[in-house]
Structures are given as structure tokens and as C-alpha cells.
Image (cartoon, rainbow, N blue to C red):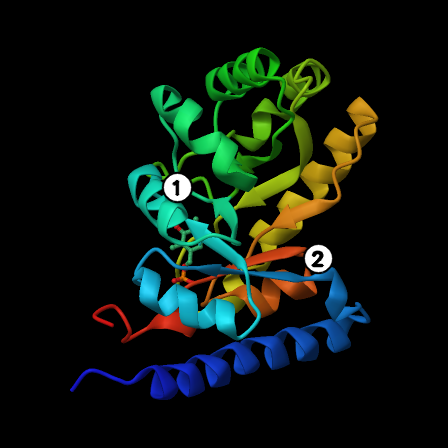
Amino acid sequence: MPRTDAELLELLQNRFQQVNKQVARSCEKVGRDPKGVQLVAVTKSVSARVIRLVQQLGYIKFGENRPQTLWAKAEELPGVEWHFIGHLQRNKIDRTVPLLTLFHSVDSARLLQSLAEFARKQLLSPRILLEFNCSREEAKGGFAPQELPAMAELVREANPLRIEGLMTMAAYGADPEATRPTFQELRQLRDQLQQQTGVMLPELSMGMSHDYPIAVEEGATLIRVGSNLFEGLEAE
Ligand SMILES: *Cc1c(COP(=O)(O)O)cnc(C)c1O
């Protein structure tokens, strides 16, 4: 039986409330203001219909990881702040970047340079984060932490891009507590890069359904939550 809009709204409202409550608990534990944590709802598994209902509840920050899906949804859904969280091939920069509020996953020097070139030509100044592979899993993209010293120059020369912080994905494991060192490392990398460049890097995009309570304790300013909000709604 497909769910009605009213049923879906109620379910979504409950799930968003659960996440907000957990964010508040994690903030309280470490003395942070919950206003410093933005929830990005990762909508990659759900339809435009479900996203529209979420918008009705007052949430507008949505994350997608595939450019083609993002293009289609952006056309259908005005009034959204799109966050890109996947790997972007350079030939898709033109069509993707103008749609974005924040590009979380800039994962190579080549991509960074192509973005800067695009931004100069189009007179844009996109907001971006640099993705680091702190878990050191081979399958994951991102800059390696040991590349940090060489990155100061990249950051200083990224004009007109606005580099606002760092992003990472922790390794998935049974125990969320095991992700803590990954998040601590990202914060330390941010502190170092900020010091080396004098560029302010306030944003830390870290934490997913499985581990966002830990990420918030460790200073996340953006959490990217998908399955906790949308599990079981893939067919709606
Ligand atoms: C899918 C995805 C998420 C959300 O993951 P969940 O475990 O479903 O919360 C967050 N970040 C990135 C980069 C993703 O691809």
C-alpha cells in the first residue's frame, strides 16, 4: 500500500525530530550551541515527491551525490539549497556548480583548479569544502592527510573559490565510537590549514546516520544524514 501524503508527512516529521533531538543531546554533552550544526538531508535514495514533503516541513538543505540526479531534481524542485557530496567529473562542472549552495566533496587538486578556472570565467565564487580521506580506505576519494603541507598554496591560489572548510567520511564499522579519531583528525587538519594559510575554514562536514552523534561532539558544523531520515521510503 502506498502511503498518503499525510502519512508520509507525519513519519518524516518524527524522523527529523529524532535527529534534531540527538543533535541537541550531543551538543549538550560538549557544551555546544545546536544552532552551530546544520542538518543536510541526503535525498539520494528518495523521489521528488518525498523531498517536496520535507520542504513543507520547513527543511530546505538537501544533499545529492550524483550529478544527473541532482540536475533532474533541481529542475523539479525550486527553493532548495543543494549540497553536492559525491565525486564530480570535471566535464560536469558547468552544469552542476551553478546549482549548488555548497560543494562538500572537492577531492583533488585537478578538480580544484578546474573549478577555479570555471569560476573566473563565469564570474562566480562557489562555496566549497575540501574532502580528506582520514579513514585511509583505498576506495574513498579525497586528499590524503599527508598532502596537507602542499595544500597551503592551493588554498591561497583558489581565488575566486570560497574555501570554507573540510569534509570527511568515516569508515563504516559496528561501533560508531571507533569513528571519533577520524573526526578529531579532520578538525586538526582544519586548524593546521587555517594557520598555514590565514584563510578562515569554519565548516566541518562530518557525520552520517551511523556516526553523526560522535561527529557533533567532535565539532561537526554540517552533518549529512540519509538513511535515518529516509529508510524504507525509496519507493514513495
Ligand atoms: C549517502 C551519503 C551520506 C548519507 O549516508 P547515510 O548513512 O544514509 O546517512 C552522507 N555522505 C555521503 C558522502 C554520502 O554519499
Distance between the alpha carbons at the discs numbered 2 and 1? 22 Å
What crowding class fits label 2: few (fewer than 14 Cα within 10 Å), some (14-19), or many (20 or more)?
many
Q: Position of residue 133 (x, y in %)?
A: 49, 38
- Across and down, in percent, residue 159 comes to 69, 17
Please tell me how crowded label 1 is: few (under 14), some (14-19), or many (20+) other residues with Cα within 10 Å.
few
Residue placed at 50% from the left, 72% from the top?
Answer: 56
Quadrant in the rendering for residue 36: bottom right
Q: Amino acid at mark 2?
A: Gly
Which residue has dot 1 on it? 137
Locate the C terminus and report the quarter of the image it occupies.
bottom left
- Which residue lies under the disc numbered 2? 219
In-image side of 146 versus 65 (left or right): right
For this view, does 184 lie left or right of residue 40? Answer: right
Q: Tell which circle, 2 or 1, labels the residue nearer the N-terminal end.
A: 1
In the displayed structure, does residue 172 sit left or right of residue 185? left
Q: Secondary structure at mark 1?
A: loop
Tell me which corner region of the image, top left, top right, bottom left or bottom right, holds residue 164.
top right
